[in-house]
Image: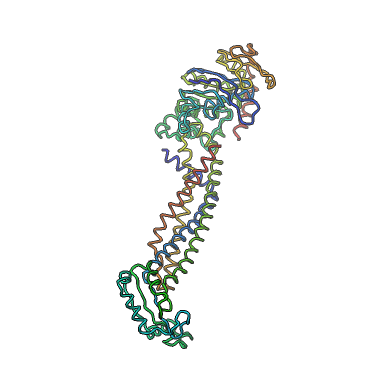
């Protein structure tokens, strides 16, 4: 489904490559966490999978396409088979929830009839059927991320890429979003999710790929969150099979519901304001 | 579906950038008006050429008593000279080129001169004998005037051979210069129109960068992404070129036909029919210009 072979990505002007000889294979239906410090190469890897960028060397195959060879005019059609969500939701502030989701179908030329049935269905699935006509500014952060997820999956993508989807959300809301992403995965969509959220990674017991300084330092099924010291001068020479730090720290305690709820409503109002 | 989407995007873009759109309209209006004027001047030149060249004749002026002695050492042309010229005009060598010719004697020349300079003091002093007797030669093809000029220049008793077109050519070169100047101004204005359109389209893209990001993310085709921007430039430029066409038609109807044609009744001027030929050229040029300028701008913007 996704095969990345010996990929190195060197950005112009950067002293070291963002990705250094990375090899990774992801099967259909997999749920993969990409973890690692900021600058470890998670986002670079996602950009390569979405063909936002091409590697300096190595090859990337996604959904049977060689992304180094794919002609520019076919890239949009390739992306229609992918869904993507971000930390900052990226909703259009002047469109309602339903219009935001419908927009992504309109611009790829779907028929009005298809949009009229697909949009309510997907909003129902993410639990926002009753807020179809609200503007994003009237929603909480968690609800906005649900809209973003609805937009990402409305065209039934084969792969869902999520770049720190819970990064702006409090733990309880993050849980809701993760349950939704798990449901999407259970329906057959391959999920690749970059995250810093140790609690989520430890609890879900999925495949965990750890990146550090552009290299994969650990790749485990049923893994936990692995912290790797950032040492730009002395690169960890850990081979792929051998995790740098096999033991994962204990999962954080369940968040205190009372405080978090109070915090969330404040936080979400802030979010809603912008 | 997709068409409705494109139109709503175009409408939004135009509303968001009203002042820039107005400036595009004005710049295309002015530049295309210059283009239209230059085209009409060329039409005018062509039309005057066919009109006047058809009527232009070659004059063979014979010597008079007062002719300068360098050209006419033997004084006024004798009857013999007239016979020689006449025979030469009737000869098999020249006849095929000549449509007709006639002879204007002193009295006729005097009458024409008096009519032309009526009321001016020069008319009182000129006598019939001071005016040239002239053979007026009308050629089948006015471009072949050198044949006549060469045949008669230097013959004793002929003062000068003159192609009337040489007078007209001065007028035409002035009109031509005006037309070239108009084209020059027009190209400068068109250049600024192009730059203005690309700047406007870049601004428009910048103000819609969120939408553009989403569209690229969800896999909208390049055509779908770019078309609204191209249409935006095209719509603005079309309004400008339609207005420019209106101005050109107005100039022809009210200035040329309404004023010039009345003031100079013996000259043939461009009419509304010819101005209507210019209209599709202007609108086509405006649309093409805008399509290329905005298409190039949006493609460059999206590449970054």
Q: Answer with the quarter of the image where residue A173 lies.
A: top right
- The colour scheme of the drawn protein is rainbow
Q: Using the rendered view, name the quadrant where residue B140 is placed.
A: bottom left
Q: In the figure, is residue A42 to the left or right of B244?
A: right
**Vertical position of residue B230 compared to residue A263: above or below:** below
Percent x, y for residue B15? 51, 47
| Residue A176 at least partly seen | no
Can you say which quadrant of the picture contains the N terminus of chain B? top left
Q: Please name whichever residue, A194 or B38, is drawn nearer the observer in this view of the structure.
A: B38
Measured as percent of width and height from the top left, residue B156 is found at 41, 79
Number of on-image labels: 0
Q: Could you tell me residue B184's position as x and y percent? A: 52, 58
- Quick check: B264 above or below A97? below
Whether residue A10 is visible here, answered yes or no, is yes
- The residue closer to the viewer here, B161 or B17, is B161
Residue placed most toward the observer, B230 or B5: B230
Work out whether B290 lies above or below B275. above
Spot occupied by residue B181 in the image (x, y as percentages of width and height)? 51, 61
Residue toward you, B156 or A140: B156
The quadrant of the rendering that contains the C terminus of chain B is top right
């Amino acid at each position: 489904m996704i095969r990345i072979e010996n990929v190195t990505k060197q950005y112009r002007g950067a002293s070291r490559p963002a990705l250094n000889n990375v090899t990774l294979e992801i099967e259909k239906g997999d749920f993969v966490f990409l973890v690692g410090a900021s600058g470890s190469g998670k986002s670079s890897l996602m950009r390569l999978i979405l063909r936002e960028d091409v590697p300096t060397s190595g090859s990337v195959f996604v959904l049977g396409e060689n992304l180094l060879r794919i002609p520019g005019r076919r890239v949009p059609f390739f992306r229609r088979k992918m869904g993507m969500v971000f930390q900052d939701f990226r909703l259009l502030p002047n469109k309602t929830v339903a219009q935001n989701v419908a927009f992504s179908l309109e611009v790829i030329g779907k028929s009005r009839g298809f949009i009229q049935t697909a949009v309510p269905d997907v909003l129902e699935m993410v639990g926002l059927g009753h807020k179809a006509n609200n503007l994003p500014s009237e929603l909480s952060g968690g609800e906005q991320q649900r809209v973003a997820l609805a937009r990402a999956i409305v065209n039934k993508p084969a792969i869902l890429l999520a770049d720190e989807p819970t990064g702006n959300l409090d733990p309880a809301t993050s849980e809701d979003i993760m349950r939704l992403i798990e449901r999407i995965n259970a329906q057959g969509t391959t999920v690749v999710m970059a995250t810093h959220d140790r609690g989520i990674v430890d609890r879900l017991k999925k495949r965990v790929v750890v990146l550090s300084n552009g290299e994969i330092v650990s790749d485990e099924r049923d893994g936990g969150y692995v912290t790797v010291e950032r040492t730009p001068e002395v690169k960890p020479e850990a081979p792929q099979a051998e995790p740098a730090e096999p033991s994962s720290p204990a999962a954080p305690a369940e968040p205190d519901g009372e405080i978090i709820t109070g915090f969330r409503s404040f936080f979400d109002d802030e979010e809603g304001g912008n | 579906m997709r068409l409705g989407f494109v139109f709503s995007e175009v409408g939004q873009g135009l509303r968001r950038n009203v002042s820039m759109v107005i400036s595009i309209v004005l710049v295309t209006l002015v530049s295309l008006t210059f283009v239209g004027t230059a085209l009409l001047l060329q039409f005018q030149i062509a039309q005057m050429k066919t009109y006047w060249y058809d009527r232009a004749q070659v004059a063979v002026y014979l010597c008079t008593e007062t002719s300068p002695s360098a050209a006419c050492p033997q004084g006024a042309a004798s009857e013999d000279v007239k016979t020689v010229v006449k025979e030469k005009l009737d000869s098999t060598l020249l006849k095929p080129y000549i449509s007709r010719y006639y002879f204007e004697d002193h009295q006729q020349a005097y009458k024409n001169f008096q009519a032309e300079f009526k009321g001016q003091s020069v008319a009182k002093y000129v006598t019939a004998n001071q005016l040239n007797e002239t053979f007026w030669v009308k050629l089948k093809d006015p471009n072949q005037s050198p044949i006549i000029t060469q045949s008669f220049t230097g013959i004793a008793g002929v003062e000068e051979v003159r192609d009337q077109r040489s007078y007209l050519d001065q007028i035409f070169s002035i009109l031509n210069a005006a037309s070239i100047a108009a084209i020059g101004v027009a190209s400068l204005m068109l250049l600024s129109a192009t730059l203005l359109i690309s700047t406007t389209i870049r601004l428009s893209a910048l103000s819609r960068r969120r939408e553009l990001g989403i569209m690229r993310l969800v896999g909208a085709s390049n055509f779908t992404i770019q078309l609204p921007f191209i249409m935006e430039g095209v719509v603005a430029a079309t309004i400008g070129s339609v207005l420019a066409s209106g101005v050109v038609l107005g100039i022809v109807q009210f200035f040329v036909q309404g004023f010039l044609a009345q003031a100079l009744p013996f000259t043939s001027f461009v009419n509304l029919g010819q101005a209507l030929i210019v209209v599709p050229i202007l609108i086509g040029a405006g649309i093409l210009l805008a399509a290329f300028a905005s298409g190039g701008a949006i493609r460059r913007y999206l590449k970054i």
